[in-house]
Every structure is written in structure tokens, then in C-alpha cells.
Image (tube, helix red, strand yellow):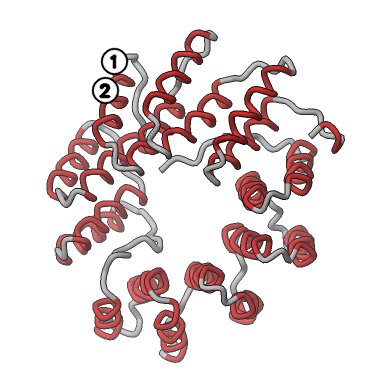
Amino acid sequence: MSGKGLSPDCQTCSTLINGFNKNQKMDETMELFKKMQQQGLKPNVVTYSTLLDGPCHLGRVEDVGSLLDEMVAQGIHPNVITYNSMICGFGRVGKWKEAFQLLNEMIERGIHPNIVTLSAPIDFICKEGKVQEAHRLLEKMISGGMEPNVVTYNILMNGYCMVRQMNDAVRVYDSMVSKGHKPNVGYCRRCRIDKALSLFNAMPRNGGVQRTTIVCDTINRCIDKATKLFQDALSSNVDLDVISFTILIDGLFKAGKINEARNLFNTILTKDLKPTIITYTIMVKGLIKEGLHDHVDYLLLDMEKSGCPADSVMFDAMVRCLLEKDEMGRATEIIRKMKEQSFSFSGIDCC
């Protein structure tokens, strides 16, 4: 790292640790953490929270306990982000018991859970098929003065879809919209394609938000049928928004249809739409994974010109993709740009 002219600090190391963790490269993570300490850099709460994310994702309960003890011994106290990282990490690998123990420990320490903390148990309960129980927990959150966000509502809707209680899913959807939350593409992603198509065809032609939602959900499930449905929606004069284009671009990249993804991106402006930072981030990630670095540079320049410059989330995604391909040199260059532009680094992507 030093050979690249990059003076390491906690932010730099935390960024690299985060990238290694997300690619499940625990050996590289621990080696970097040791080098960081050997160079006299003192880890902070962000560094430890980022570091804890790795063993949590792998279900290494003892490693998590050891790191947490070490963190406290260094006089660094875990915060809500630290606990969210651990709770979400254990939840992803099905260790519900450990996740709920951490939630109770967090409350006992006087650390107040936030919406991310409480959305995680709702997700766990839904995945167990106990959707009514999850719904009761949501209502308890609301009565306690905590307003759920669109992610929380999506978790519950997906739970109802998973157990085929479509009417209940729609009621949650209506409740979410009535409270001013803008729907996103997570709605009913576990619905079958034929169900989605039936809902799409049954909706009125001017049902913009609902029809767009069905298109996006189908994209998440089957790229070939999604592409056809997308074209049908355009032919039906459905007012598809940039989210619909963005999700299809993402699906095309994941399906290995690189040229199709790039072509669809180029058509966005012809529809009088403007790519968002999310659209650009998906494009950049897809291009990096294909090794098309010249195209990435051109896209970043285009973002600057269009008034939508890269943000810390995009840079973090780029670092992660580059580390996945073992391109440390390019990753450190991205970190240099982050530092030059004074981007802050949170280090944790929770739940």
C-alpha cells in the first residue's frame, strides 16, 4: 500500500477490510488488521465494527466474542452500528439465537436499537414463516414511536408473499404508501412469474406505480421473461421510471448479458429520464467485473459532466469489486480519490 504512495490510516484500512470481508477473504482481512496495528495505527469503532462483520457472516461466534472483548479492552465501546453489523451478520447465516442474544445485550448496555436493528428480527421471523408474529412486532415498533422505513415494509410484504398470503401483502403495501413511503423494487420478489404477469395484465393501463412494481419484481426473478415484460410495458404506454430501467440493467449484468445492459443504459436518455447514482453504480460494478476499466473511466467522466458525481457508496462498491478480482493497485487508487474528495467512510453495509 505504501509503495503506491498511499499513506495508510484508519479510514483506508477500514475500507480495505470492508472489501475483503464482503468477498469473504478473512485471511487477508486479519493480515491487514495486524499490519495496521504493527504500523502504530489504532483501530477505532468503525474499524472494529467493520472487522466484526466478517466472522459474523461466516457464523464464527467465538471469533466475534474474542474481537468484541478485545475491542472493549482497548477502551473502544461498541455502538449501534457495531451491534447492527453483528445482528445482521448472524441473521444471514441462520444463527437467530445468537442474533437475539446480541439484541438483548445491546439493550442491557443502554444502546438504543434503531430501525435497522429492529428490521433484522422481522426479517428472521418472516424467513421462519411466522409472518403474523413478524407483523405483530412491526405494530409494536410503531406503537413504541419508531416509524418503519420502506425496507421494513418490504420485508413483511415479502414474508406474506412467501406464504402466499397475497391479500395481506397488498394491505401492507397500501399501508406503506398511505404513510408516504415510495415503493421500491423489493415488493413481492418471491411471487411466481405467472402470478406477476397476471397481476400486471389485470391492472389498469394508468396504474403506473403498481404496474412498474410488477415489472421490477419480475426482473428480479427471470431475466428473459422480464425483458419481454419490459417491452410489453413500453408498448402498453406504461410510464416506466428510471428504477425499472436500473433493475433490468442490473439483471442483465448478472445474467452475463453485458452488451444488452450497456445498450439499455444508452436508451435511458431517449426516454427523457436521467440515470441516478444507483444506475451508475450498477453500471460501474458490472463493467469492473468484466475488466472494462476504460469504459469505467469514461462513465465516471460522464457522471461529472451530467452533475451526478460518484459518491462514497459507489467508491466503496468499486473497491469491493476490485478486491474481488485481486486488483489491489486499482483499489488503492480509488481509496486515494476518496481521500482527495474528503469522503467519509461508514465501513458497514447492514442488512
The residue depicted at 45 percent of the width and 91 percent of the height is 235
Residue 318 position in % (x across, y down): 66, 51
Which residue, given by chain and number where applicable, does mark 2 sit on?
Answer: 104
Residue type for callout 2: Asn
Residue 337: which quarter of the image? top right
Figure label count:
2
Numbered mark located on residue 336 in the image = none
The residue depicted at 47 percent of the width and 11 percent of the height is 72
- Answer with left or right where residue 48 lies relative to residue 7: left
Which residue, given by chain and number where applicable, does mark 1 sit on?
Answer: 108
Residue 116: which quarter of the image? top left
As displayed, is residue 37 above or below residue 141?
above
The C terminus lies in quadrant: top left
The answer, for residue 272, to whether it is visible in the render is no
Asked which secondary structure carries label 1, the reply is helix
- Badge 2, how many Cα within 10 Å: few under 14, some, many 20+? few
The N terminus lies in quadrant: top right
- Badge 1, how many Cα within 10 Å: few under 14, some, many 20+? few
As displayed, is residue 208 above or below residue 342?
below
Residue 347 position in % (x across, y down): 57, 35
Q: Nearer the viewer, residue 194 or 241?
A: 194
Residue type for callout 1: Glu
Residue 145 position in % (x across, y down): 26, 33
- Answer with left or right where residue 172 lies relative to residue 267: left
Residue 340 position in % (x across, y down): 80, 38
Residue 96: which quarter of the image? top left
Q: Outermost residue, front direction?
A: 27
The answer, for residue 14, to whether it is visible in the render is yes
Asked which secondary structure carries label 2, the reply is helix
Tell whether label 1 touches label 2 (CB within 8 Å): yes
As displayed, is residue 62 above or below residue 205?
above
Q: Distance between the residues labelled 2 and 1?
A: 6 Å
